[in-house]
Image: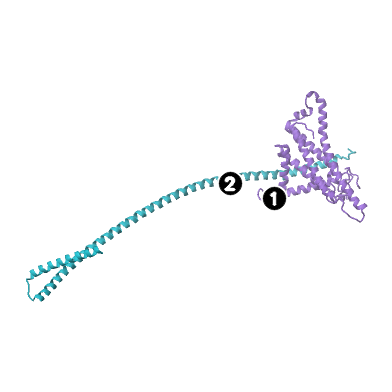
Chain colours: A purple, B cyan
Amino acid sequence: MEHGHSGGSGLEHGTWFHWLYYYRVLPKWLPEVVPETLLVVVVLSIVVILARPRLRTRNPGKLQAFLEFCVTSLDSFVRGIVGDEARSLTPVIGTFFIFILCLNMLGLVPGLTSPTSNINTPASLAIVAFCIVQYYGIRKQGFVNYLKHFAGEPLILAPLMFPIHVIGELARPLSLTVRLFGNIFGEDMVIAILILIVTNVLGRLLIPLQFPMLIFAIFTSFVQSLVFSMLVTIYVTVAISGHEEQH
Amino acid sequence: MDILNIDPRVLAVQIGGFLLLLLVFKLFLFKPVLGILETRQQEIENRYRDAEEKQRTADQLRAEYERHLAAIEEQMHIRIAEAVKEGQAMRDEIIALARSKAEDILARAQEQIQREKEKAVSELRGLVADLAIAATGKLLEQTLDDSKHRQLVDRFIDELGAQTISGRRRSEGEV
C-alpha cells in the first residue's frame, strides 16, 4: 500500500499494474482495481470483436459454439424470469454475469486482485443496475404510473408509503453492493491469510494451504455473479410488472 | 463516503468501463449471436417443412407407383391366362388335326392294302387256274374245252376258298 488511493479492501498490495503508478502513468487516487477492470473489459472486447466476423450460421467453430452456449444459457435464464421482455434485457444481464464472473476470478490469478473486492466496483455495478431497473420500470409503466406504484394503496397512506418504497428501492443497490463486496473481499482475505500462514508460520515447509480455498473461490465467484445477475433480473421483473415483492 | 472508501471518480471510471463492455457485448456478441441462432432456427424449421413436403410427395408417388404396379401385375396375370388358354386351344387344334390326318392316312393305307390284296387274290387265282389246267391236262392227257375247263377250276377254287375260310374261323373260335 504505497499509494494512498481509495478502495478500502485493504488488499492493495501491489499487483502487476504497480509500475503504472511507479512511473506515474496513472494518478495515485486511482486504485489498482481500475486497470485490472479495464484489462478485463479490453480482453473480453477483443475476444468478441475478433470472434464477430467468424460467426456463421452453419458449421460453427469451437469459439462460436462456446459463445453460443453462453448466450443461449443467459438468454434462457433471463427469459425464464422476465418472459417476453428478455430480448432487450439479455445483453444487460449477460454482461453483468460475464463481467462480474471475470472480475471475481481475476483474484485467482497470481499477482492480481479481484476488482470486486474493492467496494467501488460492486457499487458502480449496483448503480448501473439501479438505473436499469428504473429505466425499464418507467419505460413499461410510464413515469406517472411508476411514481404511483411508489405511493401504494390506499392513496391516503401515500405520505407514509412513498418514503418507505423509495428507501426500499435505494436499499437494493446497497444490498447488491455489500453482498458482492463482502463475499469476494472475505474470500480474498481468507486466501491472503492462508498464504501468509504458509510463508510466515510454516517456514520452509511450503504446503499450498490456500489451494482448497482457491477451488472454493471459483465456486463462490460463479455463485456471486449469478446472484447479482438474478437479483437485477428479478428487480427488473418487479419494476415491469408493477408489483412490489420482498426479496 | 469516506468511511466506506467510496470515490465518485473511481465509480465513474468503473461505470464507464462497464457501459463500454455492455456496448461491445451488445453489438458484437448478443445481437449477432441471437440473430444467428434465430436464422438457424428459421433455417431448420424451413428444412423440416421442406423435408415433410418432400416426404409427402414421395409417399404420394410411391402410392401411385404401387397402384400402377398392381394394375400392371393384374394385366400381366390376365395376359398370361389368355395366353395359356390360347395355347391350350392351339394344342387341341393341333392334336385334332394330327388325329384326323392320321385317320386319313390309315384309311388310305387300308384301302391300298385292300386293293393290293384283291389284286393279289385275282392274280393268284389266275395262276392257280393255269397250273390246275396244265396239271389236269397232263394227267388226263386230254384237252378240255378251255372255257369249260376254266369254269371248272374257278368253281373248285371258290369251294376251296370257302372251305379254307370256314376252317380258319373254326380254328380261331376254338382258340
Q: Quadrant of residue A94?
A: top right
> In this figure, what is the number of numbered marks?
2
Tell me the quadrant of the picture where the N terminus of chain B can be found.
top right
State the residue in front, A125 or A216.
A216
Residue marked by disc 2: B51
The answer to whether residue A103 shows anywhere in this view is no
Q: Chain letter of disc 2?
A: B
> Would you say A56 lies left or right of A137 here?
left
**B62 displayed left or right of A80:** left
Disc 1 on helix, strand or loop?
helix
Q: Residue A213 in the image: state x and y as whole percent.
A: 85, 48
Q: Nearer the viewer, residue B155 or A158?
A: B155
Residue at left offset 76%, top offset 38%: A233
Circle 1 packing at 10 Å, graded few (<14), some (14-19), many (20+), is few
Which residue carries the number 1 mark? A54
Q: Residue furthest front?
A: B174
Residue density around tag 2, few if under 14, some if 14–19, many if 20 or more, within 10 Å: few
- Residue at (72%, 49%) from the top-left corner? A66
Q: How far across and down, in percent of the image, does residue B45 sit? A: 62, 44
What's the chain of the residue with tag 1? Answer: A
> B168 or A56: which is nearer to us?
B168
Establish whether labels 2 and 1 are both on one chain: no
Front of the two marks 2 and 1: 2
Image spot of residue B130 (x, y percent): 13, 72
Q: Amino acid at mark 2?
A: Ala
Q: Where does the C terminus of chain B fall, quadrant-wise?
A: bottom left
Label 2: state its secondary structure. Answer: helix
Q: Is residue A97 visible?
A: yes
**Residue reaching furthest top?**
A156
Q: Amino acid at mark 1?
A: Arg
Q: Horizontal and vertical percent for residue A167?
A: 83, 31
